[in-house]
Image (spheres, rainbow, N blue to C red):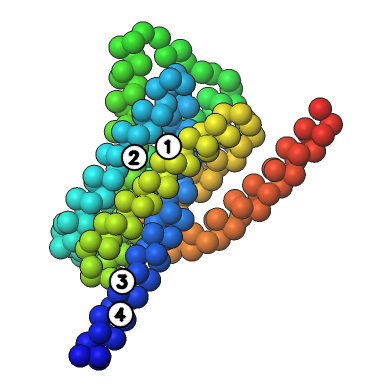
């Protein structure tokens, strides 16, 4: 009886550790997603930005849970289905390549518009509604790409589906809480928007490299961007003191 109680206690601790680890991993890997969401929603009128973030992240949460419920199908996407010049084609590779190209093109376009100060008018309520729906769909679709590898990692860490779903819910709540703060900072300090867009361009290249089986640790990118952010914060502090 005592051994059974100890085993149940150990199982509970293991489950708690798995939950905390997965939650932290999902939050860290969601940084690029938060930046993308902030830049997209800043194109909308202020009064509906929070709604766009809520519905976009909510739809992304639903798609992530559906992906977890389709584990067998997800694992099948890692298997080659064709070969071109000795290179194996997989569903995972096509998803990552498509997402990387989209993120690369979108980020370069946004950077160009920002530098050239070309800000198209939103216009009528119909255009606002179209932009809102389009942004929500973009957030949800790109989240599939961002979350693909993290879900595969989660599957490798634990086979407890409720724990994986709970960790994703926690990460999405954190993302929802901080996306507004990041959005305000990006809008208030234009130099941060340039830094954010260049970060997304790097992530786009990383996704393309991953699609062709060239693995570049994301930690390198996060470290470089973190250092750049630190330098920019020092510059911002210096400008405020001079101003």
Kindly state the secondary structure of the residue where label 1 is placed.
Answer: helix
In this picture, residue 103 sits left or right of residue 159: right
Look at the picture and state if 32 lies above or below 3: above
Q: How far apart are marks 3 and 1 (CA)?
A: 31 Å
Mark closer to the chain start, 1 or 4: 4
Q: Which of 198 and 12 is in front in this view?
A: 12
Dot in front, 3 or 4: 4
Query: In the rendering, at what x and y percent does residue 168 appear?
Result: 32, 54
Q: In which quarter of the image is the C terminus?
A: top right
Mark closer to the chain start, 4 or 2: 4
In this picture, residue 12 sits left or right of residue 116: left
For disc 3, the neighbor class at 10 Å (few under 14, some 14 to 19, many from 20) is some
Query: In the rendering, at what x and y percent does residue 147 appear?
Result: 33, 53
Query: In the rendering, at what x and y percent does residue 69 appear?
Result: 17, 56
Mark closer to the chain start, 3 or 1: 3
In the rendered image, which residue does mark 1 sit on? 37
In the rendered image, which residue does mark 3 sit on? 15
Query: In the rendering, at what x and y percent does residue 41 appear?
Result: 43, 29
Q: Distance between the residues labelled 2 and 3?
A: 26 Å
């Amino acid at each position: 009886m005592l051994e059974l109680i100890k085993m149940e206690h150990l199982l509970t601790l293991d489950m708690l550790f798995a939950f905390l680890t997965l939650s932290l991993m999902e939050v860290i890997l969601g940084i690029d997603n938060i930046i993308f969401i902030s830049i997209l929603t800043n194109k909308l009128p202020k009064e509906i930005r929070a709604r766009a973030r809520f519905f976009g992240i909510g739809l992304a949460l639903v798609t992530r849970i559906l992906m977890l419920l389709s584990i067998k199908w997800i694992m099948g996407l890692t298997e080659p289905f064709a070969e071109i010049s000795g290179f194996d084609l997989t569903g995972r590779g096509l998803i990552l390549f498509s997402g990387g190209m989209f993120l690369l093109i979108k980020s370069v376009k946004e950077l160009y518009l920002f530098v050239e100060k070309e800000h198209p008018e939103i216009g009528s309520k119909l255009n606002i509604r179209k932009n809102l729906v389009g942004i929500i769909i973009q957030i949800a679709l790109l989240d599939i790409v961002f979350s693909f590898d993290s879900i595969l990692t989660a599957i490798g860490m634990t086979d407890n589906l409720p724990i994986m779903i709970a960790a994703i819910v926690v990460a999405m709540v954190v993302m929802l809480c901080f996306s507004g703060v990041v959005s305000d900072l990006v809008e208030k300090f234009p130099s941060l928007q340039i830094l954010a867009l260049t970060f997304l361009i790097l992530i786009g290249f990383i996704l393309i490299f991953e699609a062709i089986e060239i693995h570049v640790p994301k930690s390198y990118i996060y470290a470089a961007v973190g250092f750049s952010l630190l330098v920019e914060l020092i510059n911002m502090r210096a400008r405020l003191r001079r101003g």
